Image (cartoon, rainbow, N blue to C red):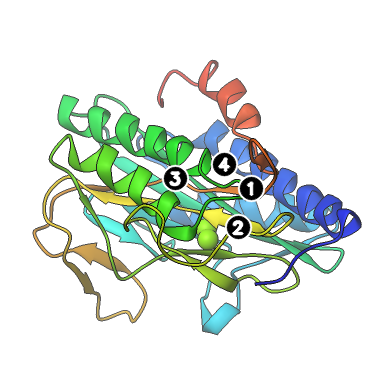
Amino acid sequence: MIVKTLEEIELIRESSLLVGKTLAEVAKILRPGVKTIELDRVAETFIRDNGAVPGFKGYGDFPATLCISINEQVVHGIPSDREVKDGDLVSIDCGTYLNGYYGDYAYSFAVGEVEDSVRQLLRATKESLYLGAAQAVVGKRIGDIGNAIQSYVESFGYSVVRDLVGHGIGKNLHEKPDVFNYGRKGTGKKLLENIVICIEPMINLGEKEIVMSTDGWTISTFDSKPSAHFEHTVVVKHGQPEFLSTYDYINEVLSQNQNIE
Ligand code: MG
Ligand code: MG
């Protein structure tokens, strides 16, 4: 795993903040009837207007700026002419590349009147992210992060997707270490001060198994039940982690756009 300098951490923070502002721009127009490709266009334009480039577009041939994954789709959904519907769970993952460093994080929105079970899944998944992140401190190990996430969400009967994990970030979008969303306390690699990691629980309402779509990208739950995804970027520090990403910009929009929460 790559220990970052304080200068590098500031650059990752700038890229991360741009992701947050981009997701807020997207949230402004997120409502029933909007096409996911329209959300993607807004994101790409905003990122380029801010002197950066989309982090995902062209990465492994991914064709878009955003990954937009609806309901049973877990991650890596490709924006299209599909319209968002009332009651949809819409997970949006965004990456930016600015001044040589990547930013990458995700938020799952409830659009319109979603079922209570989905609302609870969203709340628990977001909460599990913060519980996992609280373990991202010197003296802990990778397994402590995963254990905090897994034990919390499983207490509600949800399941943790195993095949997709969080990661280090910096000059590359995906760096070591792998950050599992499951695991045992006190196991795995030791966390070093000033490594920067993306923690991103992908939590299923039903079973943990997933399937790949014929488009080669979109990953969905095998049982077609909903899945939620939240992601933050943090620096491992003594005592408590330092968040480089923030949902503040999104929260501001959530308080204004009555169509989403
Ligand atoms: Mg990520
Ligand atoms: Mg991401």
User: Which residue in the protein does label 3 denote?
Assistant: 230
Residue at 16%, 65% (x, y): give it.
209
Residue 148 found in image quarter: top left
How many circles with numbers are drawn on the protein?
Answer: 4
Does label 3 or label 2 sit earlier along the sequence?
2
Q: CA distance from mark 1 to mark 2?
A: 6 Å
| Quadrant housing the N terminus | bottom right
Name the side, left or right, on which 146 lies relative to 192: left
Does label 1 or label 2 sit earlier along the sequence?
2
Does label 3 or label 4 sit earlier along the sequence?
4
User: Which residue in the protein does label 2 denote?
Assistant: 197
| Residue type, mark 1 in image | Val
Residue at 19%, 43% (x, y): give it.
154
User: Which residue in the protein does label 1 denote?
Assistant: 234
| Mark 2 vs 4: CB contact within 8 A | no
Give x and y (percent) for residue 83: 34, 48
Does label 1 or label 4 sit earlier along the sequence?
4
- Most distant residue in the right direction: 7
Give x and y (percent) for residue 89: 30, 40
Does label 2 or label 4 sit earlier along the sequence?
4
Q: CA distance from mark 1 to mark 4?
A: 23 Å
Name the side, left or right, on which 7 lies relative to 105: right
| Quadrant housing the C terminus | top left
| Residue type, mark 4 in image | Val
Q: Which mark is residue 26?
A: 4
Tell me if I can see residue 128 in this picture. yes
| Mark 1 vs 2: CB contact within 8 A | yes
